[in-house]
Image (cartoon, rainbow, N blue to C red):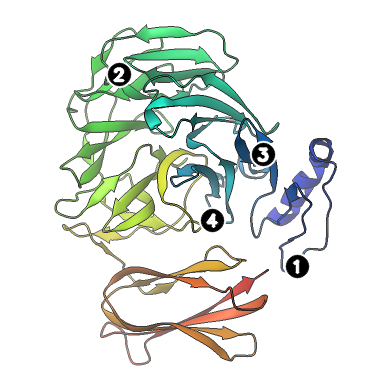
Amino acid sequence: MSRTANILIALLTLCTTVFAQNTALFWSAFDQGFAASQSSSTIMKSVVGQAFVGFAQSSNTQHGAGFLANALLHEADSVTGVIVYSRSGATRTIWMRATDGSFDTMVISGGSWPRLSHNSRYILFHKGNGDPAHQGMFLYDLQTRTDTLLRGNNDYLVCYDWFDDDYHVVFDQVCGIYIMNSDLTGFTTLYQVNCYDDAPVARPGSWAIAHHSNTGIILTDSLGVNRHQLSNTGAGDYWPSWSPDGQWIAFMRRLNDTTYNYYKIRPDGTGLTALTTFTTTQATFKEGGAWTRDASKIIVAALINGVQGMYAIATDGSKNIELVQTAAGDPIDFVGSVTGNVNIQLTDINEEGKEIPTHFELFQNYPNPFNPATTIGYSLQSDSHVELRLYDILGREVTTLVNEVQTAGHHSVRFDAGGLASGVYFYRIAIHSDKLQSGGFVETKKMILIK
């Protein structure tokens, strides 16, 4: 049975729940694998476009109900999953992107810094005061589309994480590390030692905890016993994250005000390995970061060479990194959880930190289908003359997006089709470079505009 058929079957099995939540839901014909019908409170889109999104309002937070992402994507025997992340901006938002890129959609408006539970039902997140130092910790239920305040707008609750049981939560606040249950019971103080103890993360398969402080990466257990600094870490090491098997800790290390690097280390302080080696290039990693299920990559938010977005860092020490394509929107400021594998090709980094693609490539526009804007990306192995043109279904040229010499690297162009009619369009790239034989590199891809 095809994956699409499996998805539709799963969708149908949830109809009872969906109708109980929203009796206004209705269905219409799918066109090109995309349904655009909607009621006043529900928008239904097929898996080719976006995940099911139903809007509700609760406690001044707008929710795009993403509970189908759990049923359709978080399968025990599948490598497909979701990346849960947030975007900054006037209205902070939480998003889910399929690890295979099949959708990228907002699930919460008015929240930030999400951590998905292991069973993919709940999200811990920040909400409240615009000052990050005074935001509350909330729990959002992806099935019921409701949120619950766990800790109020107290000072400096930086971050939090789930233990394996999806019931106990570890978090920092003011000058301590604490544990509580997701049903608001069992509040326990582990210790109040250092006001710089922040960003605790729970070790998979155990009750151990790692967090950063102003002296380095700290390890302890769920009783707050044996608090100690991890060997070979020091001041300027921040935001630890555990590998899925609990055998490695990744963290960022500050080189100067604008340049950071990523490292991994064993919990016993051995095996320190540089994963990136930026020196003079601006490379600022944002808070958070999460490993893929196969532990081959760490997904982070970062600003690298002036390009802010989501990046995948190889964990094998090869120094390879790649920009992950995401939907257009506000800057990404936090990656909290990854439940699958991200199968994209990583590129080399030279000593200056510049990404050098190993081949010429035209990427599928994203999102697709789209309305009204989409982004087209491509890679240049060397300095090249690039022509990127858009054509309608009859082969008539609609517009020229690029016609110039560009340097080696990754490039993208945002295309706004506000003045075009719905339909199928084609974009064609022609690359001329000394690296290519006569004829150059030419490729064409299809895009779908739906209004």
* Gap in angstroms between the C-alphas marked 2 and 4: 35 Å
Residue 450 appears at what percent x and percent y?
67, 69
Query: Quick check: can you spot residue 223?
Result: no
Label whose residue precedes the other's in the sequence (1 or 3):
1
Q: Which is more toward the observer, 53 or 362? A: 53
Answer yes or no: do the residues labelled 4 and 1 have beta carbons within 8 Å? no
Residue 180 appears at what percent x and percent y?
50, 13
Residue occupied by mark 3? 67
Q: Is residue 316 above or below residue 329?
A: above
Position of the C terminus, as image quadrant, is bottom right
Secondary structure at badge 1 equals loop
Q: Quadrant of residue 353?
A: bottom left
Label whose residue precedes the other's in the sequence (1 or 2):
1
Q: Is residue 23 left or right of residue 396?
A: right
Residue occupied by mark 1? 31
Q: In the rendered structure, which amino acid carries the disc numbered 4?
A: Gly
Residue 84 appears at what percent x and percent y?
51, 41
Label whose residue precedes the other's in the sequence (3 or 2):
3
The residue positioned 26% from the left and 51% from the top of the image is 318
Q: Which mark is residue 9?
A: none
